[in-house]
Amino acid sequence: MIHKLKLDSRYLSGSFDQNYKPVHTINSGDSLHLTTPDIQWGYSPNEDTPKTFYKSNQQEEKPGHPMIGPIAVNGAKAGNVLEVRLNDIVPGWYGENWAGGGPSWQNQAAGISEEEKIQLDWHLNTTNLTGSCQIGDRSFHVGLSPFMGLMGTSPKEPGTHDTPPPRYSGGNIDCKELVKGSTLYLPISVDDAHFYIGDGHALQGDGEVSGTAIECPMDHVDVTLTVRDDMTLTSPLAKTPSGWVTFGFNEDLNVATGEALSSMITLMEEQYGIKKTEAMAIASTVVDLRITQVVNGVKGVHAMLAHGALRG
């Protein structure tokens, strides 16, 4: 069954809390067709229409990222896995990103802590998936690779949880590999899963170094949610068009790297029937470690095993 949710404040949350009442309920195997707002809680369908701004359905003092959710999935139990299949992701016509204007560690490293914050306004062509922005009298052009920066289930810990840091249940992963055609597997920590999705990105580099990607609304997101009781996970796992991806999240980049690597070694043990030391030796030849993002407080690293890189 397909559930079409029009963009409306009653479907939006700006934080995670297992006690939030679901904004919608579906069955395992159902699909959602969504339109998501930009990072500033706004949406414009075309260049001739001013933005409409939306609010969180929850009573947060300071809402974070605008997310559609929580979506309840009937029959999901704590300990199961939620399979999130990304069937289609179509960005809106505009996007923005920012740099400077604050004492973040990356601004200090780049020598721009005292510089005035700038905003780049991007025009997005959704037909040929290109984007352009103007800096002075020069135009800059990029190819787009849209994905959802934030997908997660509710954490098991009680209370309200902010959106910026990624965690074992997913959330603000900000991994540019999670494009159309990907499947993300998320641990389920509370009954009915309580799935959230938002934070559209038209293009992002590994690291998301300024703190933002090309932040954009999504005109159309098509996802299928399936409960898996034949899997057990303690952190997110993804199968993308490019390969298998495991994740690590921690304030310490070394610890995050270790988590991503450990999960990849476990995956290789299971898929290839080899020992941990053997998987580690092979991983050193075919697995890439990449910095997902360094700007969400909790940093992210992902390990990637490309399809076809290992045969046997």
Image: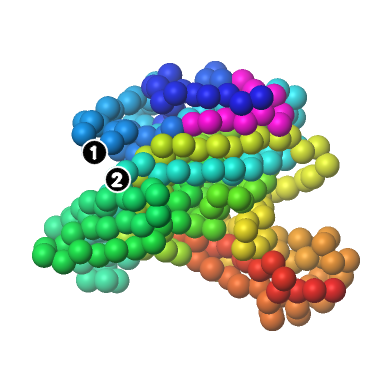
Can residue 282 be seen by looking at this rendering? yes
Q: Which of the two marks, 2 or 1, is nearer to us in this view?
A: 1
Q: Where is residue 19 in the image (x, y as percent from the top left)?
A: 56, 22
Label 2 Cα crowd, 10 Å radius (few <14 / some 14-19 / many 20+): many
Task: Please tell me whether mark 1 sits on a helix, a strand or a loop.
Answer: loop
- Farthest residue, direction front: 127
- Residues at badges 2 and 1 in contact (C-beta under 8 Å)? yes
Gap in Å between the C-alphas at discs 2 and 1? 8 Å
The tag earlier along the polypeptide, 2 or 1, is: 1
Task: Please tell me whether mark 2 sits on a helix, a strand or a loop.
Answer: strand
Say above or below: 277 vs 262: below
The residue tagged 1 is 47
Q: Give the range drawn in magenta.
A: 25-34
For the point 32% across and 33% down, the residue is 45
Is 33 inside the magenta-drawn segment?
yes
**Magenta: predominant secondary structure element?**
strand
Give the left or right position of residue 116, taking residue 263 as reference. left
Can residue 246 be seen by looking at this rendering? no
For the point 32% across and 56% down, the residue is 131
Give the left or right position of residue 99, taking residue 278 as reference. left
Say above or below: 96 vs 47: below
- In the picture, the disc for residue 94 is 2
Amino acid marked by disc 2: Tyr
Label 1 Cα crowd, 10 Å radius (few <14 / some 14-19 / many 20+): few
Dividing the image into 4 quarters, which one contains the C terminus? bottom right
Dividing the image into 4 quarters, which one contains the N terminus? top right
For the point 40% across and 49% down, the residue is 127
Amino acid marked by disc 1: Glu
